[in-house]
Amino acid sequence: MSNLTENKLDQTLPQATMDTALNALDALLASLPTGSLTDAERASLPAINVENKIFADDVLNEMSGPIAGFLPGYVNAAALENDLAIFEQLDIIEGRAYQVIRKCSDLKRIAGTEAYGTALAVYRLVEMANGAGIPGAKEAYDKLMVRFEKQGGKGFKTKDEFPAAPI
């Protein structure tokens, strides 16, 4: 992607696609149960792993057998069953959402790399034009050079500092 003539992502999303995607995401968010975690809760609550999920499934199966007769009334098999069911549903949604996020992230990286590479090449051309005293280049250069002021380095500031062309 360092080649200015190569543009792997030379398109935009139609507004209808944007509307459809955002409406679908809004609908999904609105349809999910309420509930969220604080940062502290995210850090402290245990995540269920494969072995713990299998264990919870096994416990639910056992709760419908002989142990149901001696479990206290406050132990609710239906609540455990619901928790496991929504866990599985959300796991499927999360997996698909991660695919979407990865795709968006990759496409953003491609577009950003291409945009910045082109912008940098144009800046270098403006910088050289400014250094050569080309009319109109100074204003653009003065505006664009701000991005690089804190990085040190020395660009071509005036035509006097522009390197002589090789003979």
Image (tube, helix red, strand yellow):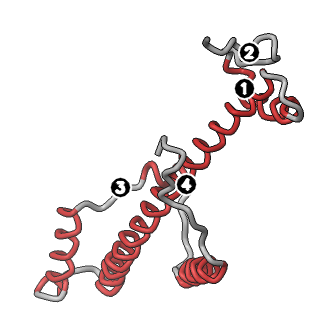
User: Mark 3–mark 4 contact, CB under 8 Å?
Assistant: no
Between disc 3 and disc 4, the foreground one is 4
Mark 3 crowdedness (10 Å alpha carbons): few <14, some 14-19, many ≥20 = few
Instruction: Tell me which amino acid carries mark 1.
Output: Met
Mark 3 — residue?
A: 46
Q: What residue type is labelled 2?
A: Phe
Q: How crowded is mark 1: few (under 14 residues within 10 Å), some or many (20 or more)?
A: many
Dot 4: what SS? helix
Viewer-nearest of discs 1 and 4: 1
Q: Name the residue under label 1.
A: 128
Badge 4 or badge 2: first in the primary sequence: 4
Q: Residue at x 52, y 80 (%)?
A: 32
Q: In this view, does 136 lie to the left or right of 1?
A: right
Looking at the image, is mark 2 or mark 3 nearer the viewer? Answer: 2
With respect to residue 110, does 121 lie above or below?
A: above
**Which numbered dot is residue 111?**
4
Tell which circle, 1 or 4, labels the residue nearer the N-terminal end. 4
Dot 2 falls on a residue whose secondary structure is: loop
Q: Residues within 10 Å of mark 2 (few under 14, many from 20)?
A: some
Viewer-nearest residue: 125 or 47? 125
Residue on which the image places disc 2: 162
Mark nearer the N terminus (3 vs 4) = 3
x and y percent of residue 38 in the render? 56, 56
Marks 2 and 3, the one that precedes in the sequence: 3
